Amino acid sequence: MAATTDWRQAADFAQFGGHRPGTALDAIEGAQPSVVLEPFEPAQVAAALAWASRERLQTVVRGRGSKLGWGRPPSHVDIVLSTARLNRAIEHRYGDLTVTVAAGMALADLNQQLAQHGQWLPLDTPFTDSTIGGVIATNEAGPLRHRYGTPRDLLIGMTMALTDGTLVKSGGHVVKNVAGYDLAKLMSGSFGALAVIVDATFKLLPVPATACTLVARYTDAKVLAADAAQVAASQLEPVAIDIRALLGPVVGGSECQLAVRFATSREATRAQTSAARALLRGSVDELEGVREGAWWSEQVRRPWTSPGTTLRLSWLPASLPDVVQCVHDLQRSTGVAMELTARAGVGTGFLRIEGEDGAAAVIEQLRAQDGLLGHVVVLRAGGDIKRAVDVWGEMGSVSGVLQSIKRTFDPAGILNASRGPI
């Protein structure tokens, strides 16, 4: 790579839209970028990528920065490419229940606009400033995933800027249009390592008329898991089936909560809530209105509101009791308090480990659970932990495929500064 002064002095930054020198506030885990680019238009994003590729400049894409700590610490960053100025809803086709939105718009702002027509994009995030591009790039999803899926499942189209400076459209504006469908799906969960998302088209749903949640408390994780499986296998249609298990020296894993949420018409919600109550053996509390909304807001934020190390785990839904028991056993053997917040019907969730002492050992032990856990990914951790363990873990046989995809889309290797997973 050319010396820093060479490429900065030679660049015509005006062609990339807004630009400024990087500061300590722009640093990504200690790596301060030389330049922050803030394009106003998709063509400026593409031009910036083509230039960075020619100069072999390590580039990290940033929305509003809520998840910049996810990934390996970069050795250095030349450019932060911000989507902050690409921040509007481009077209809402409310008659077709679809919307096209620029990548830099916040999910919360989008749903506020969609609500004016009684519609919403059913994704939940603990970060109020999460952008559409960031949600797609990390494939971030919360409790609503049980019914509505992840961003990948709701996408029907996308425009992206490639590292050769071209803009590519994938998919379309209607639900049945699947032109380039798989390419848009590929960008979901790529963490900005393949291309830059500049806009996306989603299918929408009507805002439910009402919602009600049953929260059942258990002292036996096997009973909880059996009840969760029974609800999931029934004819009921909950929008979320979640658990909350606080495991620590005081409670000792003595209580877990199972939450089952219904959101549809008032009559259907009332009927399904009544039927679900008959399937739950724990002590049940029924939540509606403000209390109901507050419980789920807290549930979404719980892995992040208290200090500690946060992991994302995956498993087969039927293995839920074994997963809870595994975490409980680790807590007792290490003495470290932990909290599991999970999607019971899907087989994924977050484990928050209090503090950093012993966290690296817990991560290694979780990864050693052959056949129980599919993935153990470190999302939030201090530098000592990230130096001790790889945040993504062993990729196995898929590693070669991922590297081949990376070389195809980013042959110069400029995107995401080797932060992974690709």
Image: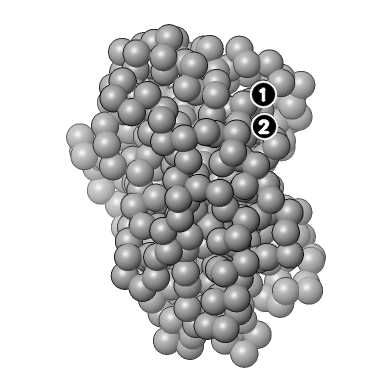
Count of all numbered marks drawn on residues in the image? 2
Q: Which residue carries the number 2 mark?
A: 319
From the viewer's perspective, is 190 left or right of 81? right
Q: Which mark is residue 372?
A: 1
Q: Where is residue 75 in the image (x, y as percent from the top left)?
A: 39, 20
Answer with mark 1 or mark 2, whichever residue precedes in sequence.
2
Under circle 1, the secondary element is loop
Disc 2 packing (10 Å; few <14; some 14–19; many ≥20) = some
Q: Which residue is drawn at 60% across and 76% down?
A: 271
- Asked which secondary structure carries label 2, the reply is helix
Foreground mark, 1 or 2, reads 2
Tag 1–tag 2 contact (CB < 8 Å): yes
| Residue sitting farthest toward the left | 24
- Closer to the camera, 216 or 340? 216
Residue drawn at x 28%, y 42% as measured from the top left: 305
Say the numbered circle drawn on residue 146. none
Q: Is residue 290 visible?
A: yes
* Identity, as a three-letter code, of the amino acid under mark 2: Ser
Structure colour scheme: one colour
Q: Where is residue 72 in the image (x, y as percent from the top left)?
A: 45, 25
Gap between marks 1 and 2 measured at Cα: 7 Å
Q: Where is residue 82 in the image (x, y as percent from the top left)?
A: 38, 51
Q: In which quarter of the image is residue 358?
A: top left
**Along the line of sight, the residue nearer the viewer: 385 or 341:** 341
Q: In which quarter of the image is the C terminus?
A: top right
- Identified at 42% across, 86% down, the residue is 116
Residue 166, visible in the rendered structure: no
